[in-house]
Image: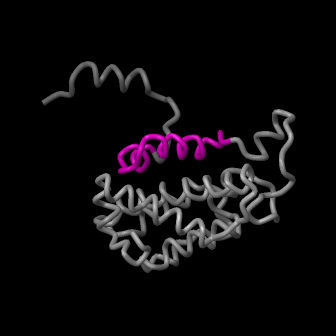
Amino acid sequence: MAPPLSKMAYKVFLYGSIQFEPRRRLWKSWAPTKYKMFLWLAIKNKCWTADQLTKRGLPHPDKCILCDQEEETIQHILTTCVFARQFWHSVLSPLNLQQLVPNRREHSFATWWRKITKRVDKQQRKGVNSLIILGAWTLWKHRNACVFDGDSPSVSTSMRNLQLEGHLWVLAGARNLQNLELGRLGL
């Protein structure tokens, strides 16, 4: 059976356009829309971090507020920041996935996420995708609490927030997240 004419026309219309690489992992995952939108903006480097504020001539912190070591970019906050790597280690270790924690050379959240997806069992993939989205959101919210509310960077506070939010996701129907046996994370 041939595909519908409208589907073929749509493909021809988009032929040669730039694809958003992690689209399936992001849009097909179980996560609320605002989390998906945040991650889409993060992958596109469109979040309001110090590097973006610099481009617009706006005041900004000199260094990442979480580690106080490097320039703040959204990619740094989600992957290369010392704080982020400690956070991801705390998230992935209970699932025996500590070997997938981003390293210092990971400069792209999307690339790191793709590597994780390829190395996780197929039956765990959707749950891990949801967990990565939840983790990225948790890092962003914790960074914002440090910037705007004067909180101190704390991996334990971030983990507690991830557990609380993850529990709500499971109650709302995130079966794949629940199937990861996240009891070890407190969900």
State the extent of the magenta-drawn residues as a range: 23-47
Majority secondary structure in the magenta region: helix
Asked if the magenta segment contains residue 37, the reply would be yes
In the image, taking residue 95 as reference, residue 78 lies left or right, namely right
Give the image location of residue 125, x and y in percent: 35, 62
Give the image location of residue 60, x and y in percent: 84, 45
Give the image location of residue 182, x and y in percent: 37, 72
Asked if the magenta segment contains residue 126, the reply would be no
Rendered view: 9 above or below 30: above
In the image, taking residue 24 as reference, residue 113 lies left or right, namely right
Residue beneath the point at 63% across and 73% down: 86
Q: Nearer the viewer, residue 67 or 121?
A: 67
Give the image location of residue 52, x and y in percent: 76, 40
Residue beneath the point at 70% across and 66% down: 153
Count the marks: how many?
A: 0
Residue beneath the point at 66% across and 42% down: 47
In the image, taking residue 76 as reference, residue 123 lies left or right, namely left
Rendered view: 13 above or below 129: above
